[in-house]
Amino acid sequence: MFRAAIIGGTGYGGAELCRQLLHHPDVELCRVSAIDSVGKKLGDVHLNLAHVTDLRFEDLPPQEAAKGMDAVFLGLPHTVSCELAPKLLDSGAKVIDLSGDFRLRDAATYAKHYHHEHPHPELLGTFVYGLPELNRAAIREADRIASPGCFATAIGLGLVPFARAGWLNSSVSTVACTGSSGSGAYASASTHHPVRAANLKAYKILGHQHRPEIEQTVRDAGAAQSFRLDFVPVSAPLVRGILATSLFEVPAETTADDVRRVLAEAFGDSPFIKLLEGREPEVVAVAGTNYVELGFKLGDKDGARRPIAVITAIDNLVKGGAGQAVQSMNIALGLAEDAGLVGYYGIWP
């Protein structure tokens, strides 16, 4: 058995990491550290883990948490991971960071969108971007992995195939609805679920911090350097899940079979991508799982162009968070990519 630790395990992302690793056939979750709930059993904080494990939250220095581990997950907030991660890079463990602190390669872009000067700009670009459907080969050789953001996963997976095909040379407009768990375990006036449950509201319009991450990903996949994403996130009245709809144009002669071919070429070896025919992607179909539902609709021809809508649905805490991080760990450790990720377990929240 490989050995794993989690640093920062009391949030919703931490709960998902615990859930996935405690059910993993090839990895033993050995330590979970945190600065709150210290001494409590995991199941006293994450109720779906009651009676599953006797592990308790510990307050440990990062180096101590990583000692003897094969993989260390950082489930810490943005601007915190960038302070702690450098202390782990010589630990001998695969370091997998779930924050946004090492996804972007440009320090100025990071500072602009995270409102924080990066304390270790020399490390930007040294973490492999942990989107297996794009970077599987690089993840296989990686010792440090920056796991993608939830919006970046949902939107990026819908656009990567078309970037690879050379179809993304200008701009894409995307609206993506997300559940309240994406805002974290601590409620604010705008994320408190009793208010959110009866409401729909756009926020961070055209300025969400995942926008440059998505643009970087899509350009890496083959889009023109002039590619731009116009992105509107929407706070939705649900707990978990993301439904993203991206609109752009393709050549007028493009057929549905052409689109199917592009998607099959991009995702033919991807165990978690479900290409749909006959119905549209739905959040309820992927809740609690690491799967992605992807569908498309071609519009009528208009001169030399034809509109297309690409729709993706994911669970923001699993494929958009902890599950994808475990998927990358599996690849980096030489395990089956879907180890511990097939099936549905009780979820909290």
Image: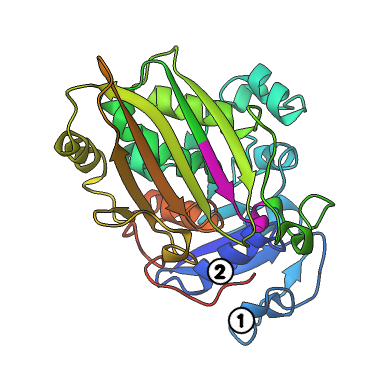
Q: Secondary structure at mark 2?
A: strand
**Position of 159 compared to 151: left or right?**
left
Q: Residue furthest bottom?
A: 51
Q: Are marks 1 and 2 in contact (CB under 8 Å)?
A: yes
Q: Is residue 293 visible?
A: yes
Q: What residue is at 64 percent from the left and 69 percent from the top?
A: 349
Quarter of the image for residue 163 reads: top left
Q: Earlier in the sequence, mark 1 or mark 2?
A: 2
Residue 29 numbered tag: 2
Relative image position of residue 248 (x, y in whole percent): 38, 27
Relative image position of residue 93 (x, y in whole percent): 53, 50
- Nearest the camera: 72 or 308? 308
Question: Start and end of the magenta stretch?
Answer: 175-182
Q: Residues within 10 Å of mark 1 (few under 14, many from 20)?
A: few
Q: Which residue was labeled with disc 1? A: 53
- Nearest the camera: 155 or 266? 155
Q: What residue is at 62 percent from the left and 55 percent from the top?
A: 179
Q: Residues within 10 Å of mark 2 (few under 14, many from 20)?
A: many
Q: Amino acid at mark 2?
A: Leu
The answer to if 179 sits in the magenta stretch is yes
Q: Amino acid at mark 1?
A: Thr
The answer to if 208 sits in the magenta stretch is no
Instruction: Name above or below for residue 24 compared with residue 291.
Output: below
Relative image position of residue 271 (x, y in whole percent): 29, 56
Q: What residue is at 54 percent from the left and 43 percent from the top?
A: 176
